[in-house]
Amino acid sequence: MRRPLKVALVPTVALAFSAIGLLPASPAVAASTTWSCASSAWRYPVSHFEVRAMLCLGESLGQLTPSLTSECKQNDALAGWQAKECTATNLNYRLTAPDGTVYNGKLPDGTGYNFDIYGTTTYKCAAGDWTYEQQSTHTLNTYAGGSGDTSQTQTINVASCS
């Protein structure tokens, strides 16, 4: 079941992410979760390996949960860009609330083709612009290998808190 979603993406990009299942599904919780996401971008840790990563904040019952959504591809000489498994590690993050309060944490490592990683710590929700700094390293799990820094900093607007 798809949860209500607030996305800070242009509508065509949001629709494409929704169609391929790249927007995060809610972790198992009793209350509905509303997701606010930054735009995603392709990053190239090495020339034959691309990672699309998107940072989101999920709001439920007045608490925010950070998440990282990743999609990994390898450039195959014969078939072009193909979905491949990768691993995301070194997932330290810093959230800065609209009032300037800073929270530091770490997401658990994750592996997959298209996958979501959710924080295990929640933070008091505050409406407004949050700064989400996510450190990350993505490693391609194929014969070609490859690994690199895919860190990013994004501003995510949380429109309201429940």
Image (tube, grey):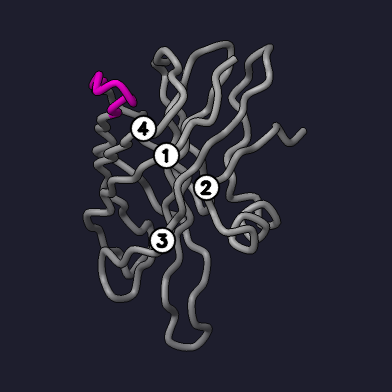
Helix or strand or loop: what does disc 2 sit on? loop
Mark 4 and 2 residues: CB-CB less than 8 Å, in contact? no
Q: In the rendered view, does 132 fall on the left or right side of 23?
A: left
Residue position marked by numbered label 2 in the rendering = 8
Q: In the rendered view, does 158 fall on the left or right side of 143?
A: right
Mark 1 and 4 residues: CB-CB less than 8 Å, in contact? yes
Mark 2 and 3 residues: CB-CB less than 8 Å, in contact? no
Amino acid bearing label 1: Ile
Q: CA distance from mark 2 to mark 1?
A: 7 Å
Camera-near label (2 vs 3) is 2
- Give neighbour class at mark 3: few <14, some 14-19, many 20+ (Cα, 10 Å): few
Camera-near label (3 vs 4) is 4
Question: Which tag, 1 or 4, sits closer to the chain's start?
Answer: 4
Q: Quadrant of residue 42?
A: bottom left
Residue position marked by numbered label 4 in the rendering = 130
Q: Nearer the viewer, residue 106 or 78?
A: 106
- Give neighbour class at mark 4: few <14, some 14-19, many 20+ (Cα, 10 Å): many
Residue position marked by numbered label 3 in the rendering = 41
Mark 2 and 1 residues: CB-CB less than 8 Å, in contact? yes
Q: Considering the image in quadrants, where does the C terminus appear? A: top right
Residue position marked by numbered label 1 in the rendering = 156
Taking the spot 77% from the left edge, 33% from the top edge, the residue there is: 1
Question: Which tag, 2 or 3, sits closer to the chain's start?
Answer: 2
Q: Could you say where residue 2 lies in the image, as x and y percent from the top left?
A: 73, 36
Q: Could you say where residue 77 lies in the image, as x and y percent from the top left?
A: 43, 86
Q: Nearer the viewer, residue 11 or 87?
A: 11
Amino acid bearing label 4: Trp
